[in-house]
Image: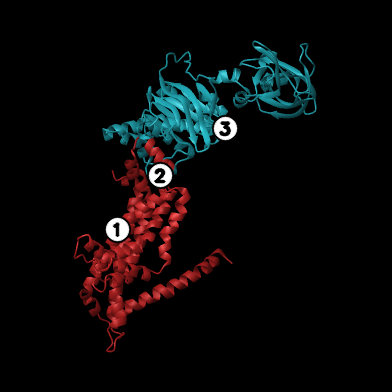
Chain colours: A red, B cyan
Amino acid sequence: MTQRGRNLVLLAPAGAWFLVMLVVPLTVVLIFSFGERGAAGGYVPAFTLDQYANLPARWTAFKNTLILAPVGTLAALLIAYPLAYFLAVRADPKWKTLLLVLVIVPFWTSILIRSYAWIFILGGRGIPALLDWIGIGGVRLINTPFSVLVGIAYGYLPLMVFPIFVNLDRLDKRLLEASSDLGAPPWRTFLQVTLPMSLPGVATGCLLVFILLMGEFLIPALLGGGKVFFVGNALVDLFLQSRNWAFGSAVAATLVAIMLVTVTAYMRLIRRLGAQREDVSLM
Amino acid sequence: MDDGGYKPGASKSQAKIVAELRGVSKRFGEVLAADDLNLAIGEGEFLSFLGPSGCGKTTALRMLAGFETPTSGEVLLDGKVVNDLEPHRRPVNMVFQHYALFPHLTVERNIGYGLKQQRPKLPAAEIERKVREALEIVRLEGFENRRVWEMSGGQQQRVALARAIVNEPKLLLLDEPMAALDRKLRKEMQIELQNIQRRLGITFVLVTHDQEEALSMSDRICIMRDGRIVQTGTPRELYDRPRNRYVAGFVGTSNFFDGKATNVNGTRAEVTLPNGMRLAGQAVSEIVPGRDASLSVRPEQIRLERAASAKDGNLEVTVLNRIFLGEHTEYLVENQSLGEFMVLTPRQAELSDGPFNAGDVLYASWDADSALVLDRD
């Protein structure tokens, strides 16, 4: 078989998957988004921009997603970075593996169960009850943007920890000695060597978490209690409850378009930073 | 024992002491990596720690840099005890074994890194000027904006050197800086390093396991073994007057004939081999009669002749192997009583007496003065 033939064979399964699971459904969604809702729900072929004109009706879902996805990514980053740093740089090599496993173990349990745990923790008999007991009353945590934020930051933490950990773990510790030898105190070594060298891991982690958060629906449904909902929740509602496939498709197509634009812009920014890495010394 | 004191050479009289180790020991768990090190390093000196891996030479260097704190004893810089002074506060810079250049910075920024850390801040123009000067010294002009990973091993080494010397350290530490270079490049860098050291007058402390490197570059060499300093001296002192068999084996090559010390008489002594044969030589260090001792004869001090010459001490030998080295020819010969040993014959001798071939029966001899009776350690 020729090299070309072998390449085709190797790529065929992934190509088929890509076609059936991504290209076809997206095309269908795009076509549906220009159609109309049937009388009994579903989809009736048409060519109209009405569905897109109707998008402001779902403004809150877009607003929540576009605020909480980046903020959630940032929150996950702020928690994950020190953790990854500790695991990679400070932790005793003897304990490193065990600590890493401890980070993963909770994620062997279903996100559904873990979110229920959070409902209890943040709910009336959880933290608010505790606060009430020490004299701070009237705090409501569950079904607020805060509870959703806690849920998503918690849920996506490992996805953020791992790329950063891998990056920091591979960081040549002799570079830190070199920096110290050249007169940089520890905190400046961190800012000038450790942090810039770990940016690729940070970039990967943020991208992974952000993309998944944009499509999130389970955590807002459970911890937002229908008050704080994402575009994902709006889609569940449109397709399964009100059976308005055309409008649902328009919402979905818009979400995909927003993600394409933000992710492309993000990748460009990262590449620009990467091309002039010496300017990222942040000093 | 060795006092390790700096004995100023003719050209460097009255040199000031910039760094000192006083009874320094370092323990890592069960391992005593450095054991009671005593050494004074003079200003402008080129000193090498020489020894096999694990002998404690890198630990000694890292204690001077501040990466390791001595378990006991004192490290002094400029007369002040610096045991607990962090590396970033020491006027000392290091060229790391694998260079440890910052991959996210250009050559220029790598070199300027140390200058940028100075407080109060140096003006940007001054940093730029100093970096350019350093690039000139290591002959890398025009490489300012290169990525360090785009450069060859030799170039990276120059960047590492420039990054250290640009800070004008009191002490420049070099941790096996040439280990990753090929032989030819290593020779070039050795000469260049020496030139740079003379020009800048910075005190260099080199760690190496390569005796040739240490011998060719250093003013003084500190031979280490099992965490201890065995002997400190100029290359010549170590070569001519090694303290024991270990030093003689580490500085240059030598033939050793092992036995017991006998007939010790001032600067003369004998080694009696297990087979009863007695070999005379010079005693350059203290020899205790009855102790294990070796007679050391350098291969180049042995003559090979077709006919026994008039003097006594001719040994009948059979040539086992011959390696042509250009200027010299190396012979492996065997004597019934002494076993195998090495002889290095200059080309001149070869021309007069004809090349010797494997199987030839010859006579080997040496002057008793050129043989040394050494303690086995």
Total marks shown come to: 3
> In front of the other: label 2 or label 3?
3
Residue B362: x and y, percent? 79, 21
**Callout 3: chain:** B
Residue at x-position 26% and y-position 32%:
B120
Q: Where is mark 3, residue-wise?
A: B52
| Quadrant in the picture for residue A283 | top left
- Specify which label sits upstream in the sequence, 2 or 3: 3
**Callout 2: chain:** B
Q: Give the side of residue A40 with respect to residue B64, left or right.
A: left
Eyeballing the image, is B277 above or below A58?
above
Amino acid on which the number 1 mark rests in the picture: Leu
Residue at x-position 54% and y-position 36%:
B182
Q: Residue A74 — which label?
A: 1
Determine the secondary structure under disc 1: helix
Residue B255: x and y, percent? 68, 24
Q: Where is mark 2, residue-wise?
A: B103
